[in-house]
Image: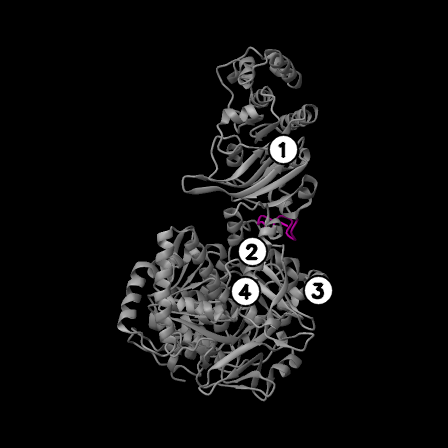
Amino acid sequence: MALLEIRNIETYYGPVAAIRGVSLDVEEGKIVTLLGGNGAGKTTLLRTISGIVDPQKGTVAFAGAMIQGADPDAIVLKGIAHVPEGREVFPFLSVRDNLRMGAYTRRDPDGVAKDLELVFGYFPILRERAELAASQLSGGQQQMLAIGRAVMARPKLMLLDEPSLGLSPLLVKQIFGIVQRINREQGVSVLLVEQNARMALQVADFGYVLELGRIVMENTAAKLMESEDVSEAYLGNKQQGVRGERRWRRKKQWR
Amino acid sequence: MAIALSESSTVPTAANDAAGSTVPQLFARALTTWSGRTALREKTKGIWRSVTWQEYGEHVRWVGLGLAALGLKPGERVAILANNGVEWVEADIGAIGAGGVSVGIYVTSVARQVAYIVNDAAARFIFVEDEEQLDKMLEVRADTPSIEKIIVFDMEGLREFRDPQVLSFAELLALGREQDTKHPERWAQLNAIPRPDDLAVLIYTSGTTGPPKGAMISHRNIVYQMTHVTDAYPVNDTDNHLSFLPACHVFERLFGVWLSIGHGMVVNFAEDGETVPENLREVQPTIFAAVPRVWEKFYSSITLAVRDASALQRWAYKLALAVAYRAADAELAGKQPNVGLRLARWVAYWTVLRTVRQMIGIDRCRTCLSSAAPISPELLRWFRALGINMVEGYGMTEATGGITINPFDRYRLGSVGKALPESEVRVSRDGEILVRGPHIFMGYLNKPDRTAEALKDGWLHTGDVGSIDADGYVKITDRLKDIIITAGGKNITPSEIENELKFSPYISDAVVIGDGRKFLSCLVMIDADNVARFAQDNAIPFTNYASLTQAPEVVALIQREIDAVNKKFARVESIRSFRLIDRLLTPEDEELTPTLKLKRAFVNKRYGDLIESMYRAA
C-alpha cells in the first residue's frame, strides 16, 4: 500500500472540470513529481489532497485512511503539509513566528523546539534572520521559510507547489538539494509540482504527466527524462531541424 | 464547347449540363454564376472569415499564372502538403487551371513518405502549409530533384528564413498578379489546355501492403461525379458544408471541393480535428457527408449523454425513440406510417429528437451521407429514426468517389444502393463487384501491373465481394482479400462482425482475426473518452491509456460488449478471444488509415505476438 493513493479524482470549479479522473500513488519515502503545462490541473490536485477544495468524485487515501472532503486542518494533523505556490508566508510575522505557525497543531513543545533547530540546520539563513518580518526576506528565503514551515508540522508527506517559481537557477538548485535531504534524512515523502521539469526529474523517483486534467504518462523519472514528448514539451530540448532551428512542436503522443 | 450559364440562381443546375467539360471550365462558370457570393469560410483567430467566389477566383488565377511563370508546364505535377483550408483549394484549382496536375499529400506523412510521393509523381512544385511541413520537405530535398520550388502558405516563424528554393504563397500570388496585368488573356488560354480525358489529379491511396499508389483521375472522371452523385445527395448554392476530413482523400475532395465548384455550396473549413464538434454546432451545415467513424462517434456521444441524464430524460428519450423507430421501420418497409404514428413522431421530434439533433449539430441537415467504409445498418436506422435524411454510398478512389448510392426515398437497409447513372455494376463469377462507366480512373501512375490487375476490359475490379438483386440494389459482403476461411473451412466476412462491434460506444474499431485458425478472435481499439468515463463512473483506477486498457473491469466491459455481439451471429462466427490495443493511436501511426480505421494487414503484422498469444492461450 502506498502512503498516498488517489483514485479517480474529479474536481470542478463551478461547471469547469479541472481534474477529470486522476489516479496516482506516492510511495512512502519517495519523491514523486507531477509535470504538466499551465492549466493542466496540477495545483488543483494538490489543493484537493490538502482539503482546500473538495473533489466531486473519487477517493484520497492517506496511510490507509480516506481523507477526501476532510477539512484542511484535519488533514494537516494526519501528516500532510502543503507548501503553496507563491510561498504565502505571513508577511508581518517574524521568521521564527512563521515557523512556529507551521507547528500550530502540535502539542509537544519539546519536539517543536527540536524541529525549529532542525529547520535552522537546513536553512541557516533563516536563523540569521529569525527576528525579521517575513516580508523582508528575499524570494528564495521566503521559499525556504515556506518549506521550513511545512517541516515544522512534522509531516509524513509534503506537497510542494512550484518551489522554483521566480528563483535564480542557483537558488533553485540549492532548494531542491535541501528538499532531497529532508526527504532522505527525515523520511518525508514528497509530491512535487514543477514547471522546471529538468530539476524535478533530477530529484524525483517517479513522475506523472498531467494534461487537461488527465494523466497521460507515468514512469520512473529516468524513463520520463528519455521520453521524446517530455524531452521536447517540458525539457525544452529542440530537435535540430535541417534549418538549424525549429519553432514548431511535434504532436505529442505520450508513449 | 458551349458552357451553359444558368442565370436563375435558385437551383443552378450548374454541373448537370456540363458533361464533357473540364475542371477549369466548370470553375470559370462557377465564378460567373456566384461571383459576389460566399464560396469558402475559414476560422482565423476565432472569427469565421468569408471568401467570395470572386476572391477565390482571383487567387486561383494568380496561383496558376504564378506557377506558369515559374515554369510549370501542362501535365506537370504540383503537390500540396497541408491541412484543408482556403489556400489548399486555391493551390489545387490554381494548379489544375494552369494545365497542371494536383497531388494532395497527407500532413500526417513523415518526410520519407512525402519524398516517395513527390518522386513517384515527379512533382515540380510543392505547396507546404507551414514551418513544420516545410522542414519535412527540406529534410528530403536532396532526394527530390524534381522539385523546382517550395511554396509556403503560412510564413510564421520563417520571416528570417531565406532560401532560393522557397517562396511564400503571398509572393506567388504577387507574381501571378503581375502576370495577370501583363497578359490578361493568358489565364483563359491556360484554362483551355486540358482536355476532358487528360489527367487532372493524382490521389494516392494508402496501400495496406506496399507503397501508396497514385490513382490517375481525369477531368471527365471528376465532372461525371460532380454531376451524378447529386442525384441522391442533392446540393445547391444555399447549402453549407463542413470540411474536416482530409482533402487528399477522394471522399472530401468530391463532397467538398468538387461539389462546391459544380453546385455553389459554401465550404466551411473546420479548424482542426479536435474542434469538429464545436465547428459543427457553429456552422450548422445543411448537408453532411462523412465516414462511418464520424457517425459512430455522434451516436456514442448521444448514447452516453443519455446515460448521464435524469431518469425523466432517459424515459422521454426511450419513448421518443421507440415511436421514431416504428415510423422509420414502416417507411423502410415501403409503408406510410398511420396518422397516429405520424402524430406521435411529430411530438417525439419537437420534445426530444430535435434536441438530440441539435446536440450533434445536424438539425439543419437536409441530407446526410455515409460512405468510404462499411457502416452498421443499426446505426443508419438510428439516424433515420431521428428523422435524418441519411443515404449510404459505396465507392472508391479508383472510381473517383461514388459507385452506388442508396437514395433516401427508395432506401433499402443493408444495401449500398444502385449504380450511378450511365454506369454499370455487375458481379463476376467469383463474386467480385465490377464497375464500368465514365468515373473509372485512368490507372495507377507508374504501375502498369497494378493497373492491369484493377482494370480488365474497361471493368474496374473493386476487390469487394457482393451481390446485386433484381432491382439493381448492390449488397457488399466484404473485401475479397479480407474474407476469413477458418481452419474448419468456414467462410466468414469479418466486416459484418466488426461493424456490430463498433456500434458499441466503448469500441472505436476492431479487427477480427481467424484466417486458417480454429476460432475467431479480435483486436479492439477502445474509445478512449468513453471508456475513461466508464472507469470514472465505476471508480476504476487508471492513469494513462495503457493502464486503462489493462484494468480488469475494462476488459470485462469489452467482453460484455463482445458477448452481446456474439449473440447476433452463428456459433462459428463467435469471437472467442480478444485483446485490447494498449497504445492510443493517432493518424500519424501507420496502423490507422487517414479516415482513422485500423489497417487490417498492418495490424495483423504489428500485433502478431499479441494475436499468437490468443491462440496459444486457448
Where is residue B601? Give x, y as percent: 65, 68
- Identify the chain of the residue marked 1, using the numbered disc in the image: A
Number of other residues with Cα within 10 Å of mark 3, as a class: few under 14, some 14 to 19, many 20 or more: some
| Horizontal side, residue B545 vs residue B266: left or right | right
Element under label 4?
helix
Q: What residue type is labelled 1?
A: Leu
Q: Judge if badges 2 and 3 mark residues of a common chain.
A: yes
Residue identified by numbered label 3: B615
Q: CA gap, disc 4 to disc 3?
A: 21 Å
* Image spot of residue B374 (x, y percent): 52, 71
Relative side of B98 to B17, left or right: right
Query: Real-space Cα distance between discs 2 and 4?
Result: 13 Å
> Does the segment drawn in magenta span residue A245?
yes
Q: Estimate the x, y position of residue B562 in percent, counting from the top left.
A: 57, 62
Give, as a three-letter code, the residue at label 3: Tyr
Mark 4 burial class by Cα count in 10 Å: few <14, some 14-19, many 20+ = many
Q: Magenta part of the protein: which range?
A: A240-255
Residues marked 2 and 4, same chain: yes
Q: Mark 3 lies on which chain?
A: B
What number is the disc on residue B557? 2
Q: Are marks 1 and 3 on the same chain?
A: no
Q: Do labels 1 and 2 share a chain?
A: no
User: SS of the residue at dot 2?
Assistant: helix
Residue occupied by mark 1:
A3
Q: What element carries label 1?
A: loop
Residue B79 seen in the figure:
no
Residues at marks 2 and 3, CA–CA distance in whole angstroms: 21 Å
**In front of the other: A2 or B604:** A2
